[in-house]
């Protein structure tokens, strides 16, 4: 009599990703992700400060009950500054950061909005993401990161960068020249 083999059960489909505003009770999960993905993580106090700003947009992405990504964006006058964006290690490369950025643009709801951020020059993954999103490098902040003295690339996403120029970027500097 031949032995019947039982096929392994199909893998559980991962729960759909849901993006909603970040709130204070989410912060322990945020800190856990932050410590996994960044060599010099933000402190809890830094997240609390950003969340307390009324004019900012802070988002969290959930797979079921688990927080798997977040985005922190502050508004300074007419400019939106993306202060932090991260996706947990096992959820990277599935379009989650792009989805959170899309949600941010929708919530800001202004076609004329200008977004800016700083990114380590060595962070090619993030730079690639931002370029795909229409951000363009428009300056360098020398030795911006205190842990290793690395330069920051200043990137902007504006109506002009989306049209291929830096016309509405304040004080664009030269990039890529040491
Ligand atoms: C940067 C980060 C937020 C991207 O999140 P993500 O959800 O993986 O990004 P997405 O899946 O939306 O990727 C969008 C694009 O980013 C780029 N990208 C993402 N992961 C990449 C990788 N491992 N290698 C190269 N490019 C990558 C690609 O352009 C990708 O598009 P593609 O998959 O069509 O090629 C994530 O890698 C992360 O949390 N990194 C650690 C924290 C960090 O560096 N944050 C940015 C600080 S400025």
Image: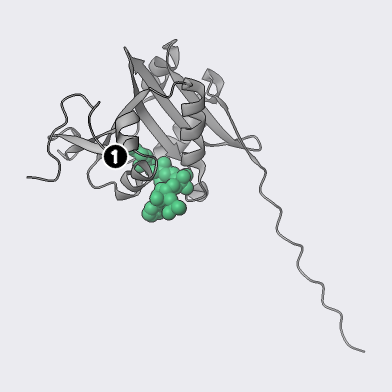
Q: Is residue 21 left or right of residue 76?
A: right
- The vertical placement of 77 against 84, above or below, is above
| Residue denoted by label 1 | 164
- The vertical placement of 167 against 7, above or below, is above
Q: Is residue 37 visible?
A: no
- Which residue is at the far front? 163
- Which residue is at the far right? 1
Residue at screen point 47% across, 40% down: 98
Q: Position of residue 46 (x, y in %)?
A: 36, 21
Residue at screen point 36% across, 16% down: 75
Q: Position of residue 113 (x, y in %)?
A: 38, 22
Q: Is residue 155 visible?
A: yes
Tell me the element at label 1: loop
Is ligand 1 closer than 8 angstroms to the Cβ of mark 1?
no
Residue at screen point 30% across, 28% down: 116
Q: Position of residue 114 (x, y in %)?
A: 34, 24
Mark 1 surroundings: few (<14), some (14-19) or many (≥20) residues within 10 A: few
Q: Split into 4 quadrants, where in the image is the C terminus?
A: top left
Quarter of the view holding residue 159: top left
Q: Position of residue 62 (x, y in %)?
A: 59, 35
Q: Is residue 176 left or right of residue 48?
A: left
- The vertical placement of 168 against 134, above or below, is above
Quarter of the view holding residue 155: top left
Residue at screen point 33% across, 15% down: 78
């Amino acid at each position: 009599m031949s032995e019947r083999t039982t096929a392994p059960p199909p893998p559980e489909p991962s729960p759909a990703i849901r993006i909603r505003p970040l709130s204070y009770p989410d912060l322990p999960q945020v800190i856990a992700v932050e410590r996994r993905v960044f060599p010099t993580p933000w402190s809890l106090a830094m997240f609390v400060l950003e969340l307390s700003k009324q004019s900012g947009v802070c988002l969290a992405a959930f797979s079921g009950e688990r927080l798997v990504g977040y985005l922190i964006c502050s508004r300074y006058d007419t400019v939106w500054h993306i202060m932090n964006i991260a996706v947990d290690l096992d959820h990277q490369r599935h379009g989650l950061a792009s989805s959170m950025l899309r949600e941010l643009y929708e919530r800001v709801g202004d076609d004329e909005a200008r977004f800016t951020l700083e990114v380590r020059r060595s962070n090619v993954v993030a730079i690639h993401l931002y370029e795909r999103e229409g951000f363009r490098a428009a300056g360098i902040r020398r030795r911006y990161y205190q842990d290793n003295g690395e330069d920051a690339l200043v990137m902007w996403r504006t109506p002009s960068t989306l049209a291929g120029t830096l016309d509405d970027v304040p004080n664009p500097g030269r990039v890529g020249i040491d």
